[in-house]
DNA sequence: ATGGACATTATTGTCAACAATCTTGGTGAC
DNA sequence: GTCACCAAGATTGTTGACAATAATGTCCAT
């Protein structure tokens, strides 16, 4: 049951969600123009709500708008994905440090459990399960840190990056690299060491950046340097 | 010459700017309700543009909106100001590190010049000049770092914090504390030391947090603990 | 052919009216 | 007196129509 009105039109938040989903899922390709009238027809909504949705998504960094010239799906270059991840590294480091100070005994067992399940998933080759656990781990650290501003910033940053994030997770060999890093983060948190946790998070995200860079060149070189 | 239309109504961006200015200047007090109809009359704009402006400002963190219940000026508690500043610390640390890697010789002389002028301003007791130089220093570091995402996040964070930032700068004795910290940042940047610059920035922002905390208790205690 | 002025079209920006929703004050039953 | 309920008012959410703007195509002079 959606929050549609009786006549089949949808509310503002719904339209925002649906456009966001479509962008994240790749149904709207990066760079594609988003003409308000088209979206109205597609979602059976009025232009007002579509406009509002586009404004929201612009602030989320998923859509790019130029005055009087319309909106388009923002295409995040690898370069920008790296910049986003660099900031994530700084802020997640902060979260980890704060989480290490505040973590409770129950949360420690919870994180250890997540770590175990990540190991299992990797051994079983369950890439998607691993990727999902990865997400919950990062989320839980945010929550434990009790730093609402950081959580806000991070949710914004990862929204922009979903595409790269996703493609990266599916890279063969990637879980093998990131698993020990994740386990190290969990260890430091459970040892209640703020400095250690921050260091571990930074090491991890630095390795993500490294992988993004490799991904960039790996993509560019098969076309014998003509791309970019 | 503003971007007004012939009949005296104003464009969307104008209204956003004017509301933002009014909030930052304190004309709209924290917690004050912002009724769309009132703002329409005040700025001679239609409700559509006022709504858009409020949405923008909501994303900037200056305004708080609850569905069907309207918007109000977001009141940033000292607690939240500290959280904001903590994130700023992390991100500005990143900027400083990157800036130290990229800084040119011209920029080094420029920063040294800012440092000298800050010393002069403090010796002369010119608090406002000092405060302004403080702002330009932080801005220049951002620019030199060439980290657009970090710049984005930071501009958002400081927009939310203007009020506390301002009150803090006017505190007697504050420049005496922060000046050496600023000079240390400049020194590390000019020495092109990423780690040193990040450390110096963190030390500085940590001292800002400390000052915010003191400010909090200094405000609370005169009322003999009844506040909070 | 080419380049510039002009009309055309596609698209976004703005507005005022209407609908939905929440708050507030009152009324009556208990 | 207090609670639930309902009506009235205030305020936000939505819509479709209209205005303004930028992109595109056309025509004519050179």
Image: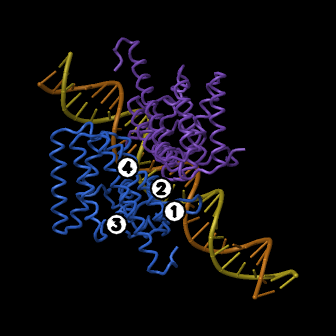
Chain colours: A blue, B purple, C orange, D yellow
Q: For mark 3, what is the residue?
A: A168
For the residues labelled 4 and 3, say whether their Cβ atoms are less than 8 Å apart.
no
For residue A58, the mark is: 2
Look at the picture and state if B200 lies above or below B172. below
Give the chain of mark 2.
Answer: A
Q: Work out whether residue B9 or residue A190 is closer to the camera in this orientation and state it.
A: A190
**First in sequence: mark 3 vs mark 1:** 1
For the residues labelled 1 and 2, say whether their Cβ atoms are less than 8 Å apart.
yes
**First in sequence: mark 4 vs mark 2:** 2
Q: CA distance from mark 1 to mark 2?
A: 9 Å
Q: Work out whether residue B39 or residue A69 is closer to the camera in this orientation and state it.
A: A69
B203 relative to D3 in the view: left or right: right
Give the chain of mark 4.
Answer: A
Q: Please tell me how crowded label 4 is: few (under 14), some (14-19), or many (20+) other residues with Cα within 10 Å.
A: many
Q: Do the residues indicated by labels 3 and 2 lie within the same chain of the protein? A: yes
Camera-near label (4 vs 3) is 3
């Amino acid at each position: 049951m959606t929050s549609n009105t009786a006549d089949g039109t949808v509310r503002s938040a719904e339209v925002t969600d649906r456009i966001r989903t479509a962008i994240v899922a790749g149904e709207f390709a990066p760079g594609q123009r988003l003409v308000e009238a088209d979206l109205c027809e597609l979602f059976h909504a009025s232009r007002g709500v579509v406009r509002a949705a586009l404004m929201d998504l612009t602030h989320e960094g998923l859509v790019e708008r130029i005055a009087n010239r319309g909106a388009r799906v923002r295409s995040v270059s690898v370069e920008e994905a790296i910049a986003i991840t660099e900031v994530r590294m700084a802020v997640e480091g902060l979260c980890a440090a704060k989480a290490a100070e505040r973590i409770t005994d129950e949360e420690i067992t919870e994180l250890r459990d997540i770590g175990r399940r990540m190991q299992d998933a990797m051994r079983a080759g369950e890439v998607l399960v691993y990727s999902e656990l990865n997400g919950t781990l990062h989320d839980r650290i945010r929550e434990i840190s009790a730093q609402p501003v950081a959580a806000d910033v991070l949710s914004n940053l990862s929204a922009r990056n979903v595409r790269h994030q996703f493609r990266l997770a599916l890279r063969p060999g990637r879980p093998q690299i990131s698993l020990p890093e994740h386990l190290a983060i969990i260890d430091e948190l459970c040892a209640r060491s703020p400095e250690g946790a921050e260091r571990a998070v930074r090491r991890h995200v630095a390795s993500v950046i490294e992988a993004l860079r490799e991904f960039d060149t790996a993509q560019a070189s098969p076309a014998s340097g003509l791309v970019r």
